[in-house]
Image (spheres, rainbow, N blue to C red):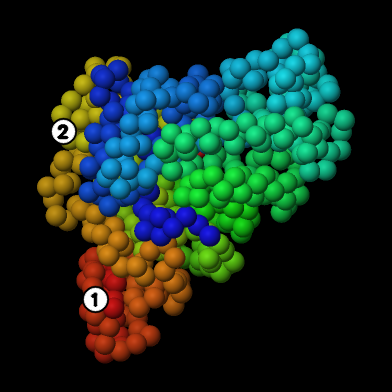
Amino acid sequence: MPAKWLKDAVFYEIYPQSFKDTNKDGIGDFQGIIEKLDYIKALGCNALWINPCFDSPFHDAGYDVRDYKKAAGRYGTNEDLYRLFDEAHKKGIRVLLDLVPGHTSEEHPWFRQSQSADQPNEFSNRYIWTDNWFCGSNLNYIAGEAERPNAYIVNFFKCQPALNFGFLKPQEPWQLPMDHPDCVATREAMKDVMRFWLSHGCDGFRVDMAASLVKYDDEVKSGTCAIWREVRGMLDSEFPEAAIVAEWARPDLSLPAGFDMDFILNDPHTHYASLLRDYNAPVDNTYFKKDAPARDINRFMDVYRRWYEQTKGVGYICLPTCNHDTPRPRFGLDETELKLAYAFIFTMPGVPFLYYGDEIGMRYQDGLPTKEGGYQRTGTRTPMQWDGGKNLGFSEAEAEALYLPVDPAADAPTVAAQEADPASLLNTVKALLKLRHENADLQADGPFEALCSEPEKPFVYRRGGLVLAVNPAGEAATVRLPAQGMKPIFTLGNASVDGGTLTLGAQSFVVLK
Ligand code: NOJ
């Protein structure tokens, strides 16, 4: 059973580097987040996911953790972070931190000892070392870096050695079984990190690469799932309100393993990209694009509906507007198209995640030089655009000192400008989230049924006593409703009902009761 408070949760993802700088060093900080809690609350979000904010050399924006229990000095102290938990809670906002269980930084003291010439030691098996020092052809192994005569396995970049959770079916002498005391110690170390932050007031974790713990596993990930079930057991007995969301995109595996939520990511198997960001396709057929030549929501819905049926009552599927790894939805969609895309995301079951700045349609900044291992992701990580002031209100530092440059466009969207415009994207997001909070049927566990998903036609779906329809096309369409006499309670664009027939205008969305 997912944590009860998730039923009406709407998350706001904060990339702390780029949210709000209060000490004029050009990098966002905890105090900046605290100062913007009222903004987040007014938006309609009641939960945060903060990207890794722990001590790190920042070769992967903080996903290379050097000390799991210490806040990164550039954001503030541990005490500042505890204060952030407190201030958020006072406003009814929950806070998830980012747990990176699959790997550490190569600068983590565990790895420094693990790789040393002084073997064996307490941390010799904390990482996965082969019994060979030369593994030339396989890129998952790094040779020639350690003092000890072995190569280690990485989880992502070279600077992120994989922690050793053991192997389900060890096939080589260097592959330890999952119940080896040193692999058990890795699991316990990760639980210890979770206990540390939960006992200081955080409400749970977004879990990085949650599928990555046990290597070379079988399709069903039984080894990795067993570890998460054990973690769930610890949470249930010690922190029953804590919530965990998996970066996995396999809710059929992660939710039964004990996660409360799982993200639908842009991986090819989810077809989520076909809704918001079809940037790799030769023609942009993104479902919400007005002029898409072959609009199709079915590729996505086929996968979604199967997972939804399999996991109903077990946990929630999360639809994010974007995250720090993906081009922003504004990359391919204009403001009207974004309104319709968000109307869909915020009225679907499960728990929605809004990436900072997507509420004002911040642009993907193509072509920026890579920052902290961001590469193409860097363009999605630029500073939040608050107002028309210095650095668009992000920081009082000189422009050269900023973590990343702010959007240089003369018409860069800002919160201040959009707050003043009743028809803005920001005010539309607020109205949609208000609608969601006011209607239990639209929340995480409200019922869901797709009524019509023919290509080129509006997508029509039922949430309990409500029928919703979205028409991204440039022409009006008619839809036969499942009941007579339904009335619009929320409209974007145009909609009218005559008996049992809905006429939905071009690029329009309606909720009927
Ligand atoms: C997924 C994170 O979202 C991404 O930003 C990071 O680079 C990798 N995991 C490695 O931790």
Please report the residue visible at 46 percent of the width from the left and 32 percent of the height from the top: 52
Task: Judge by depth and name the residue closer to the eye, 360 or 277.
Answer: 360
Residue type of the residue flagged with mark 1: Pro
- How many discs appear? 2
Quote the CA–CA distance across marks 2 and 1.
37 Å
Q: Position of residue 92 (x, y in %)?
A: 30, 48
Q: Nearer the viewer, mark 2 or mark 1?
A: 1
Residue position marked by numbered label 1 in the rendering: 488
Residue type of the residue flagged with mark 2: Gly
- Residue most toward the left? 420
Left or right: residue 175 versus residue 157 is: right
Badge 1 element: strand
Instruction: Tell me, for residue 388, which label it has, or none.
Output: 2
Q: Quadrant of residue 394?
A: top left
Q: Position of residue 507 (x, y in %)?
A: 29, 65
Badge 2 element: loop
